[in-house]
Image (cartoon, coloured by chain):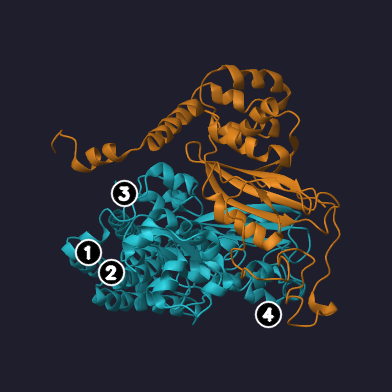
Amino acid sequence: MSLQPTEPDKAHAERDTPEVQQAAEAEEAAEVAAESPDAAVASAPVSDVEGLKEAMLDDGQEWSRARWFHDDIEMHPALYVLRSAFPDAIVDAVRFRDETTIHVARERWREICLYLKEHPRVRLNFLSDLTAVDMLRLRQNPRFDVVAQLYSLPNRVRVRLKAGVNDGEPIPSLVPIWNGANWLERECYDMFGIVFEGHPNLKRMLLPDDWAEGHPLRKDYPLRGWSEFPVLNTERPVGRVRTRWTGRGAS
Amino acid sequence: MSTDTRIAAPYEADAVFSPEASSLGTLTIEEDLALQSGERLMTLNMGPQHPSTHGVLRVVLKLDGELIVDCDPVIGYLHRGTEKLGEHHRYAQVIPWTDRTDYVAAPMNNLGCVLAFEKLCGVEAPERAQYWRVIMSELARIASHLVWLGTHALDIGALSMSLYCFRERELILDLFEAFCGARLTTNMMEIGGFSRPIPENMPGMVRDFLHVFPERQQEYADLLSANPIWMSRTKGVGVIPADVAINYSLTGACLRGSGVNYDIRKAMPYLVYDRLDFEVPLGAHGDTYDRYLVRMEEMRQTISIIGQALDQCERMDTELMAWDSEYVIPPHKGTMTTAEDMQRHFIWIIKGISPPVGEAYVAVEHPKGELGYYVVSDGSPLPYRFRIRSPDFVNLASLPYMANGSMLADVVALIGTIDIVLGSVDR
């Protein structure tokens, strides 16, 4: 056993990008925070909410991992910073199966994503997925939900962002923030007809460019299309349950 | 007309776009070529039947000599509407559709889909089933990487690699066949675990494979890793810096080849990965050669993972299926002997399950990257929305970034290094 650093270690140190180093630092800080008395604050009863909010802003340390999964959803760091930065744009926040969904206004969609990406302590810097859901039979207005699954490489948490969009209303494109949104938004336009404002190349992705039958993942589009087969009423094997959409598990 | 005069005096816009002028047969070849552009660019259509595009990918290339100026991948030739089909089938019927997306690693697709449904229902598979899920999906990782290695090397010119890789892949497909009866479209996982017993000789067969494979993989590495032709075709080709890789939402070896440490098995452990000891290989330069090294090391780590999982679960004699009266199919024995289980079985088959109203996003570490399933339930037996976030669709979006400015011959290397399966890209 020699005390010299081994070759792999040296190579590892060289190829560490600032991003990776930040991630490692954040991880260490989170571990330290989890073991420190701070963790007791995070698991404090909900009655202590105000004091905890102060602590979250002022302690100047990394948030412990427990805060992302705190029982009180207002403690969620992403929601908390958005509440202070965009007080009018937060429509709703839902926790279901340990997953946090934040509904925001579509006008501020890009600003909110950029804010969450650039915020030094939230750092939701990775766009995992971007898609939409047609809520046609679940609610009246707005019709679509544009859904972005954000991930934080340093903090190792996921947050889901949603913005309601009506048919024909544009939503700001995320391509200026993440190039990865380019194809995802094109697919979303292809399948749902949602227009992303500021997208550099918004055209069909999976379907042919001259596809004239509309957008197939909309709920009013029949499974076998409009033209090739007659539309059968018996196509859907099970009737839809009319529920009031809450996303919280109870109907 | 010489090339130089065309550059010096570009044609006027109205002449270029005039439909009469560009109609075939009225112009000489030189005039037609010159009309296409005032510059020296040539448009080359590669695919969708090109053998090196791994299926039905079409790439429209704009070339200046052999230099790629613009690259536009065109996909959708294999689009089967899996997401739409998923909305019209009961939850248990959706799982076989996922086999058909990435058909070289079907158990991995089953795993992600089943985990998403289980999360929605609040069901967790028993420990032993989780171990076997790890073993089967990691075998699928090796099978997928073998297909990647064989076809990638074949594209670049190492013809014999594909023969060797597909020989070893046969061994894995035989394991799948012994486990579930199917080789390619396995459909081996169910909500709640496995409903059929594990074959008694299964651990021994897997161990035989683990015994054989590392030696064979070393042969591949000996053939390629220090091969001067291989190195000159892959080193410095398709370089992606770490920040660009994150910006393009790349995952899997494309991201780790650039040095970003993001492996979902480590970052957000699912199943029993937190009990298994393995390393996440990282690249240094983000080029094609580094991604090759990362995937080769991943195969070695996978062999170690399977060995550990087998060691830990071989002695277990517990059940393979969770017990849940609402969401999980009752055990076979109970169905044949007791009235209650038979009734539940009947209802489960005829009506299907109705998860609570809500949504879940589950991502697993697919051989190609982050495979995510986003399922929305409205309380009916059909998923309200069934979204597949396929890794190679997102990774393929970086092809123009890598190809622009490189040579024409590198395009096949770049398509190979992204590791696409068009069934998964088009879904």
Q: Are marks 4 and 3 in contact (CB under 8 Å)?
A: no
Residue that label 1 marks: B230
Label 2 – label 4 distance at C-alpha: 56 Å
> Label 1 to label 2, Cα distance in Å?
8 Å
Asked which secondary structure carries label 3, the reply is loop
Mark 4 Cα shell of 10 Å, populated few (<14), some (14-19), many (≥20): few
Which label belongs to residue B156?
Answer: 2
Q: Chain of mark 4?
A: B
The N terminus of chain A - image quarter: top left
Comes first in the chain, label 2 or label 4: 2
Q: Pointer 1 and pointer 2: residues touching (CB < 8 Å)?
A: yes
Q: Residue at image x 59%, y 67%?
A: A206
* Residue A73 relative to residue B106: left or right: right
Is A206 above or below relative to B51?
above
Of marks 1 and 4, which one's residue comes earlier in the chain?
1
Q: Which chain is orange?
A: A
Q: Secondary structure at mark 1?
A: helix
Instruction: Answer yes or no: are tags 1 and 4 on the same subunit.
Output: yes
Q: Position of residue B128 (x, y in %)?
A: 50, 61
**Hey, what amino acid is under mark 3?**
Gly
Q: Name the disc covering residue B160, or none.
A: none
Above or below A76: residue B120: below
The cyan chain is: B
Number of residues whose C-alpha sits closer than 10 Å to that of mark 3, classed few (under 14), some (14–19) or many (20 or more): many
